[in-house]
């Protein structure tokens, strides 16, 4: 993993108000993209609208990248964001779901969401 910034749990949690807003925007635009019908008699209009939505979506995802985190759930059912961090001197991702109030879990770089573990207490400062 090539990272220029590692977050502490506290730093990542402080970004959540902004991250939550961006994720809401990503989810809204992502679901609008999913709902665009290819069966429309006005295919050109749908394609143009789809292009505009993709540009919007890329812009929101870039905003998260500028903060230093990554959007991970492209099915747009739930927002999932990873924050690079160090736990036990190992590079990991602090993992936040949009239905969680704060960041409480992490996973290895290669394990993904299914490998989530609670963040050890000593990392909350």
Image (cartoon, helix red, strand yellow):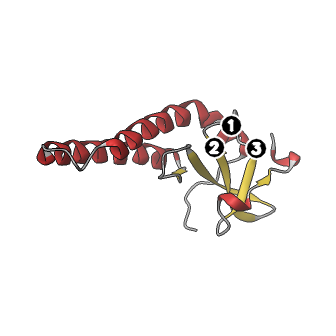
At which x and y percent is residue 50? 25, 46
Relative side of 69 to 111, left or right: left
Which residue is disc 3 drawn over?
Answer: 104
Relative side of 54 to 3, left or right: left
Query: How many angstroms separate mark 2 from mark 3 (CA)?
Result: 10 Å
At which x and y percent is residue 26? 43, 40
Instruction: For label 2, count other residues whose C-alpha is less than 10 Å away and answer few (under 14), some (14-19) or many (20+).
Output: many
Where does the N terminus fall, quadrant-wise? bottom right
**Viewer-proximal residue among 73 and 64:** 73
Mark in front: 3 vs 1: 1
At which x and y percent is residue 118? 81, 50
Query: How many angstroms separate mark 1 from mark 2 (CA)?
Result: 5 Å
Give the secondary structure at mark 2: strand
Which residue is disc 1 drawn over?
Answer: 100
Relative side of 57 to 14, left or right: left
Which residue is disc 2 drawn over?
Answer: 97
Give the secondary structure at mark 3: loop
The residue lying at 60 percent from left, 38 percent from top is 98
Instruction: For label 1, count other residues whose C-alpha is less than 10 Å away and answer few (under 14), some (14-19) or many (20+).
Output: few
**To which quarter of the image does residue 25 belong?**
top left
Q: Are marks 1 and 2 in contact (CB under 8 Å)?
A: yes
**Viewer-proximal residue among 82 and 66:** 82
At which x and y percent is residue 60? 40, 42
First of labels 2, 3 by sequence position: 2
């Amino acid at each position: 993993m090539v990272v220029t910034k590692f977050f502490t749990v506290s730093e990542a949690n402080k970004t959540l108000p902004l991250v939550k807003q961006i994720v809401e925007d990503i989810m809204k635009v992502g679901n609008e993209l999913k709902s665009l019908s290819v069966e429309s008699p006005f295919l050109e209009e749908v394609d143009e609208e789809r292009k505009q939505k993709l540009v919007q979506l890329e812009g929101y995802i870039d905003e998260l990248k500028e903060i230093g985190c990554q959007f991970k759930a492209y099915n747009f059912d739930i927002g999932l964001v990873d924050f690079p961090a160090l736990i036990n001197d190992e590079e990991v991702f602090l993992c936040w779901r949009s239905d969680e109030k704060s960041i409480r879990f992490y996973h290895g770089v290669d394990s993904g969401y299914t490998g989530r573990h609670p963040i050890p207490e000593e990392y909350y400062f």
